[in-house]
Amino acid sequence: LVRENGEEKVMNEHREHRTMPPKTGTSSKGLDAIEKMDPYFNTGKLKSLDNQYVLYIDIMGMKTTMYRSFERSTIFMGKLHVVLVKASELVQGVTVYPVMDGAYVTAGQYDQISEFIRIVYTWLGRVFVNTKNLAECFIVRAGLAYGPIVTGDSICEEVSQVLNEKTDYKKHLLFGFPVVLAAIGEESAPPFGVYLDVTVRTAAGTNLAGIWFKWCSDLSLRSRMCNQMKAYYTYAESHSEELKYDEKKIEEHKRKAVQFWGEIDKQKEKSSGKL
């Protein structure tokens, strides 16, 4: 009886332990540290703002591509970042801030950022037109803005002791209205195009007309880009469900592509005397 009662008592204690509510007022060491810490950040101690051109570039439809295929999406992103790194080595004065399937790029001079765009887009454009399997094509677009920005490198101890000690982290930070304007503008760019924000079009020395940057001066590449765009969006229309590509978005992107690349292709015909 004693043994049985003892077993019963142990079982009851075990059940009581399982059903007892958790004790309040306890926290991990991490939570204790957070409760005592003020995430101090003093913008008044940041270095003065500097006017820069800010480009935001990313791969269209990457969210659904990542959902469909890990391998294909990583290849797309990997190729983009290889091109961004190599282009930044060829053009002085540009800084790349990578963000997953895209990047922010800054430059102090319009000539610097425009040359960077031409190199990146020409390289990726050739990849695009040489891809025979349309399912393996990827398309980029971008927005470009101009104005005062602050980079993470300007964060000192007086601004934030925590971030000041994390050099590898803070160098990827970028603050300022052009950062937002470039990201918003990207949504208005045609496939393989760059939207020019009004801050760029009105900046001194740019002399730009229109809202889309005409980056391609290679007549042969222009024609091939136009033809490949038509083929790609015909493919997208017939595989919209498989690609998880909204039909309204396909129509919008196709319309912009036809206007942008069709217009460029007409310029080629005009220069050759066909128009």
Image: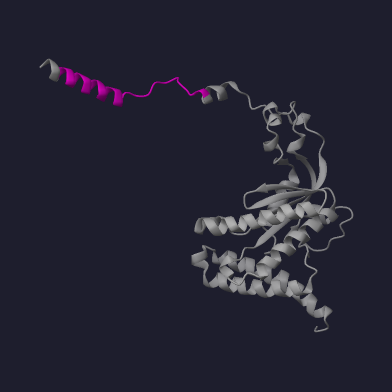
Majority secondary structure of magenta residues: helix
Q: Residue furthest top?
A: 2
Provide residue 65's location: percent of width, then percent of height.
55, 59
User: Quick one: 247 or 46, which is closer to the camera?
Assistant: 46
Tell me which segment is drawn in magenta.
Answer: 5-29
Per the image, is 148 magenta?
Answer: no
In the picture provided, is 198 more to the left or to the right than 163? right
The residue that appears at 86% across and 57% down in the rendered structure is: 206
Provide residue 50's location: percent of width, then percent of height.
82, 41
Per the image, is 19 magenta?
Answer: yes
Quadrant for residue 263, please give it.
bottom right
Q: Is any part of residue 49 visible from this angle? A: yes
Provide residue 208's location: percent of width, then percent of height.
84, 61
Count of labels in the image: 0
For the N terminus, give its image quadrant.
top left
| In the image, residue 53 above or below residue 122 | above
